[in-house]
Image (cartoon, grey):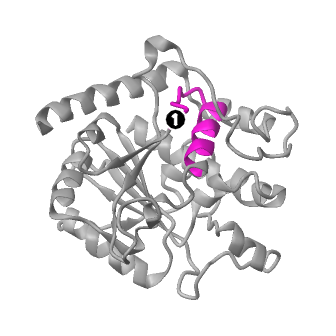
Amino acid sequence: MWIASKKVHYRQMRRIVILILLLGVTLAYAQERYRQRGGRGRSSERGAAPPQGVEDATWENDPKFQKDVFTFVRLRYTDGAGWGRWRGGRWDTDYPDSDKNFSYRLQQLTSLKVNPEPIILDITDERLFDYPWVYMIEPGALLFSDEEVVILRRYLLNGGFMMVDDFWGEREWDNFYEQIKRVFPDREPKELDIDHPIFNCVFPLKSKPQIPSIHHWYAYQGTGITWERPDAETPHYKGIVDDKDRLMVVICHNTDLGDGWEREGDNIEYFREMSEPKAYPLGINIVFWAMTH
């Protein structure tokens, strides 16, 4: 069963990498598109009002290439804090707006062909191996089953990539660390230096961004405080690599890129301060790096 799934995954990954290269996702192209558009193409003037929802975030891809598009895949997991794994658990934080908004921006600002319909998958879903990039949010109380540990390890070592986002403080880090060490007991998450290409492969970032939820931003706007807890003042971006030094996992700790995507239409200043210069550029960098390495 899993052998067949792995073959599908390899084919899908090769198609998408080739597609990216053929379509020419380049730094100059993406930066120019980003400079020109401030709000879903409604104006060519930078700083135009961001969208007010996701109802208009739809587009069509060539039917001949429906299987050769990037799909935003959100992982559903069991929350050990009692939220379970169904609707209402932490795994669905910012859903669906963040997933749809990011998918739109990715196809708007780059040449990558993107599925307008993000999906949710359990780690145990056989379709997992069809998709080379997955997103996990708020893993501060994450609890993997033994079966999920085995499958996730196999997925990542066979070429998959996971982005982990939006958890804060030492307690949540300790829990996530314990769970990811079950997946990779012999691999240690390492801090990524700002010179790592993931911070500049498409959009150059001069510092590691810390993006608070919009509610926290409202409360502390103008103070310079972007951390959500006293023990979360410093944003951390850590990576786990395979035996060939390929980055398999990017861990975004003490920051919340997902809210920067979800809330871009709620407040124009939040959009200009957090979504436009930080959340989207880094998210696009991560996808680009994952899909070309």
Quadrant location of the C terminus in the rendered image: top left
- Residue 203's spot in the image, x, y percent? 63, 45
Residue 205 in sight here: no
Query: Which span of residues is magenta-colored?
Result: 98-117
In what element is the residue under mark 1?
Answer: loop
The single residue placed furthest to the front in the displayed view is 87
Question: From the viewer's perspective, is residue 78 above or below residue 25?
Answer: below
- Residue 123's spot in the image, x, y percent? 28, 51
Predominant SS along the magenta part: helix
How many marks are shown on the rendered structure? 1
Question: From the viewer's perspective, is residue 82 above or below residue 43?
Answer: below
Residue 74 in sight here: yes
Question: From the viewer's perspective, is residue 208 above or below residue 154?
Answer: below
Question: From the viewer's perspective, is residue 231 above or below residue 237?
Answer: below
Q: In front: 58, or 139?
A: 58
Decide: few, some or many residues near mark 1? Use Cα within 10 Å; few <14, some 14-19, many ≥20: some
Residue 85 falls left or right of residue 242: right
Q: Quadrant of residue 19?
A: top left
Q: Is residue 108 magenta?
A: yes
Q: In front: 42, or 231?
A: 42
Residue under label 1, please give it: 117
Q: Is residue 204 magenta?
A: no
Instruction: Give the residue displayed 55% in from the left and 46% down from the top.
Output: 99
Q: Amino acid at mark 1?
A: Glu
Q: Quadrant of residue 145?
A: bottom left
- Residue 17's spot in the image, x, y percent? 40, 28
Residue 209 falls left or right of residue 183: right
Q: In front: 122, or 48?
A: 122
The single residue placed furthest to the bottom in the displayed view is 230
Instruction: Give the residue displayed 78% in from the left and 38% down from the top.
Output: 35
- Residue 212's spot in the image, x, y percent? 64, 69
Instruction: Give the residue displayed 23% in from the left and 40% down from the top.
Output: 126
